[in-house]
Structure formats: C-alpha cells, structure tokens
Amino acid sequence: MIREYQAKDLDAIMNLWLQGNEQAHNFIDPEFFKQNYDIVKMLIPMSTIYVQDINGVVGFIGLTENYISGLFVEKNSQHQGTGSALLEKAKQHHKELSVHVYKQNSDAINFYLSQDFAIVGESINEETNYPEVLMRCNVEHKVKIGKCAL
C-alpha cells in the first residue's frame, strides 16, 4: 500500500536511503553519505514523502515540489513494480517531474527513461564532482468520464 509518510517511518526511510545510496553509487566514497545522514534525516519531514508499506516500508519517494529528491526501494523488493508505483503516485500530483541522476548510475537512468523521462541536461554535481544528468517528465493527466457523467 502506498501512503503518506508518518513520523514512525523515519528510521526505515533513512536505512533505505543509506543502503540505497551505497548500493547505487558505489563510485562515491560511502563516507559522503554517512556525513550527510543527519542533514537528510532533518530534511525528510520537510519533504513530501510517499512510502510503499508492505509489512513495513520497502520503498519511498521524496519530493520537493516537482523535484524528485530521492526514490529508493529495498534491494529485495526491486524489479517488482515498487519504484514504478511510487513514481506513479508522484505523477498523480504533478504536471511535470524532474530528477538528477549520476551518469554512472545506468540502472536509474534506464528506469526513468522507461517511465517517460527524457534527459534534458548534464552537469557536474558540486558536492561529489561526478557528472549527472537532469531528467524531466511531462505528465499527461487524462480525465476519464464515465457513463454517469455524460
């Protein structure tokens, strides 16, 4: 079940954030993420967060307005539609979404491309000095009109 963030989710979210970053960004010194742990933990409650709760939090998406500040899925729950479902939840609330992805994270780039995102720019991440791409998706909201509304 996808639901809104609750304060009790914070520790699970932070574990996913740390493990997910270390797994997906093995080219970055793990100390970088450990050093940023406390600031991210402070910022999480200020973001819009949706969690996938299946007997506990197995994934989450964090949004700052229409920017995806994080999308993480527990390793054992990957490739089962969790990331797509979380992204779909974000699309329900925005006309456009954007995200930065490290160029070396080809799995994430391919995931976002499969979800109708396009690469619209490139830059160097100022904190890590690694190249990243900016990806954007324009969301079409289709209104379904049932027979009762005609």
Image: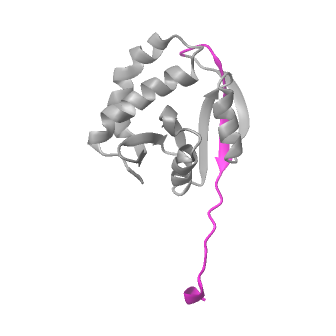
Q: Give the range drawn in magenta.
A: 127-150
Q: Nearer the viewer, residue 145 or 107?
A: 107
Single out the residue that lies furthest toward the left. Answer: 8
Where is residue 63? Give x, y as percent.
48, 42
Where is residue 12? Give x, y as percent.
35, 34
Q: Quadrant of the N terminus?
A: bottom left
**With respect to residue 102, does 13 lie above or below?**
below
Q: Which residue is drawn at 45% across and 11% down?
A: 31
Q: Which residue is drawn at 72% across and 36% down?
A: 119
Q: In which quarter of the image is the C terminus?
A: bottom right
**With respect to residue 106, does 6 lie above or below?**
below
Q: Is residue 145 found inside the magenta-colored segment of the image?
A: yes
Q: Residue at x 63, y 16 (%)?
A: 130
Single out the residue that lies furthest toward the front. Answer: 76
Is 131 left, or right, of 59 in this rendering?
Answer: right
Instruction: Name the quadrant containing residue 122.
Output: top right
Q: Residue at x 49, y 27 (%)?
A: 20
**Could one spot residue 71 in this view of the protein?**
no
**Could one spot residue 98 in this view of the protein?**
yes
Q: Is residue 119 found inside the magenta-colored segment of the image?
A: no
Where is residue 125? Give x, y as percent.
60, 20
